[in-house]
Image (cartoon, grey):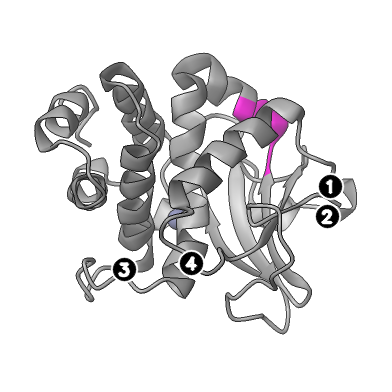
Amino acid sequence: MRRFNIIFGAAAMVLPIAASAEVICALGGGPSAAKPSSYNSAADERPSPDTMKIVLRVDAAYAPFCLPKCPEAAMFRNPTAPNLMLAVYPEGGKMVYAPAFFSSVYGKYGEAGMIALIAHVYGHAIDETTPSNWIPTNWNRELRADAWAGCAAAKAGLSASDLAAALGAMSAYPPPSQAVWGRRVPAVRLGYTHCGGETAKFDAASSGTKSK
Ligand SMILES: [Zn+2]
């Protein structure tokens, strides 16, 4: 089993450990999204090398914030998984993606789109473990994960066109409980600008995404 922190490391997942499986986030959208209930962990496989490279970019973007160590989650590919999900099991945290979903995201939005989606889902784990007094306390956990994803997008140094692709992927594959993109934009924007991204660059990139 390949363990990411999603960096490589030995720390236990710092998310509250569930007595049974608890799905923290499962992205929806797209024609083929499986339900979390159809996920069969027996079909877990190691991520593809290309995906692991992208995960490392997300890790690097978050690394400055989760000192001394980032929360650990094991990453898997699994054709029975929902698009991309984070779940907590008695043995620890796990991120699982459907390979067909990642292929589709890569085809439409490139590496930047995958960075943004992974950064959102892993952002839930970051949010559980990292102080973030810059995020309004009354935001729900999806908006908080979006703020962290915006932060990661800034730290990843995405170009203007990559930032637009990242936001396009986020709007196309929302968490079902927070599907309205217009409500999510301010959260992503806050994280992006808080972590050093330029406001004007974000606004130009987000103007191309559908406001649903
Ligand atoms: Zn989420």
Any atom of ligand 1 within 8 Å of the CB at mark 1?
no
Q: Which label sits on residue 125?
A: none
- Which quadrant of the figure contains the C terminus? top left
Q: Amino acid at mark 3?
A: Asn
In the displayed structure, would residue 82 be above or below residue 89?
Answer: above
Check contact, mark 2 vs mark 1: CB within 8 A: yes
Q: CA distance from mark 4 to mark 1?
A: 29 Å
Name the residue carrying label 1: 44
Identify the secondary structure beneath mark 3. loop
Name the residue carrying label 2: 41
- For marks 2 and 4, the one nearer the N-term is 2
- For marks 2 and 3, the one nearer the N-term is 2
Counting other residues with Cα less than 10 Å from the Cα at mark 4, is it few (<14), some (14-19), or many (20 or more)? few
Q: CA distance from mark 2 to mark 3?
A: 28 Å
The image position of residue 75, as x and y in percent, is 71, 49
Q: Amino acid at mark 1?
A: Asp
Q: Amino acid at mark 2?
A: Ser
Identify the secondary structure beneath mark 1. loop
Name the residue carrying label 3: 140
